[in-house]
């Protein structure tokens, strides 16, 4: 968080995953839950929920700094989410096998093409960026003003886009067949930020020049 508070999910493979804030466990969450900073010092939490007694979908929740949870959607199929500066929330929804970028209030921003998969989402100001796989190519796609623009496309796997302080886009990619942190600058320059021996699995958005990483390590 901007004030230095760290949120993360801790999972040891034996007990249920825990949502942690500044080293203190707040509540149990589901495996593969996703976090993004939300308004009021809390986070938006996307995790699996039971829908109508038998479906298993991702829904969106708002978690306060003290751990109180407010469920925002029911049967929403919302895998990723990110807040916009105007207070609204953009999310990645999967409907009938097709990925869509939508506002939580219902507006459609982007509909994936047939065969296209969306693997990540970030937002800053009025800009939204997604990572996409289509026809064997992985791309960074910016959505602005109802139009989609491909910023970068090649065969390297990409996921977990995050906006930086200078509007560059950080992401995880497997250039060289090992996942590391990369960024795409406003001028289109591609930069590498880590040299992990076994790979980076997940990243936080940068805050005050600092980024949290989940790395892949041998047993």
Image: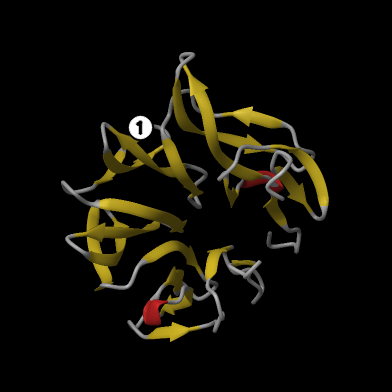
Say which quadrant the C terminus sits in. bottom right
Q: Nearer the viewer, residue 217 or 115?
A: 217
Judged from this view, the residue extending furthest toward the right is 24
SS category of the residue bearing label 1: loop
Q: Mark 1 points at which residue?
A: 106
Describe residue 75's horizontal placement relative to residue 108 as left or right. Answer: right
The residue lying at 35 percent from left, 40 percent from top is 102
Q: Which of 200 and 181 is in front in this view?
A: 200
Neighbours of disc 1 within 10 Å: few (<14), some (14-19), many (20+): few
Describe residue 14's horizontal placement relative to residue 43 as left or right. Answer: right
Colour scheme employed for the rendering of this structure: secondary structure
Q: Whole-percent x and y of residue 140?
A: 32, 66
Q: Nearer the viewer, residue 187 or 180?
A: 180
Query: For the image shown, how many numbered marks are present on the structure?
Result: 1
The residue lying at 49 percent from left, 27 percent from top is 73
Describe residue 156's horizontal placement relative to residue 47 as left or right. Answer: left
Q: Whole-percent x and y of residue 115?
A: 18, 49
Q: Would you place residue 139 above or below residue 182 in this image?
A: above
Q: Whole-percent x and y of residue 167?
A: 46, 72
Judged from this view, the residue extending furthest toward the top is 53
Describe residue 65's horizontal placement relative to residue 50 as left or right. Answer: right
Q: Which corner quadrant of the image does residue 28 belong to? A: top right
Q: Would you place residue 16 above or below residue 115 in this image?
A: above
Q: Would you place residue 176 above or below residue 19 in this image?
A: below
Say which quadrant the N terminus sits in. bottom right
The residue lying at 58 percent from left, 34 percent from top is 61
Q: Whole-percent x and y of residue 153?
A: 25, 72
């Amino acid at each position: 968080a901007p004030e230095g508070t760290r949120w993360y999910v801790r999972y040891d493979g034996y007990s249920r995953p825990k949502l942690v804030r500044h080293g203190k466990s707040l509540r149990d969450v589901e495996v593969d839950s996703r976090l993004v900073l939300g308004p009021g010092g809390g986070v938006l939490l996307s995790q699996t929920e039971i829908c109508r007694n038998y479906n298993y979908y991702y829904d969106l929740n708002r978690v306060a700094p003290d751990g109180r949870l407010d469920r925002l959607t029911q049967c929403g199929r919302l895998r990723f989410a990110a807040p916009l500066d105007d207070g609204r929330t953009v999310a990645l929804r999967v409907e009938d096998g097709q990925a869509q970028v939508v506002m939580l209030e219902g507006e459609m921003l982007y509909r994936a093409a047939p065969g296209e998969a969306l693997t990540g989402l970030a937002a800053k100001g009025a800009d939204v960026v997604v990572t996409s796989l289509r026809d064997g190519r992985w791309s960074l796609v910016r959505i602005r003003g109802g139009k989609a623009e491909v910023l970068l496309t090649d065969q390297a796997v990409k996921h977990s886009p995050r906006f930086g302080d200078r509007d560059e886009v950080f992401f995880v990619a497997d250039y060289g067949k090992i996942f590391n942190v990369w960024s795409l600058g406003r001028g289109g320059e591609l930069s590498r930020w880590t040299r992990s021996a076994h790979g980076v699995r997940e990243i936080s958005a940068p805050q005050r020049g600092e980024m949290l990483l989940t790395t892949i390590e041998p047993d």
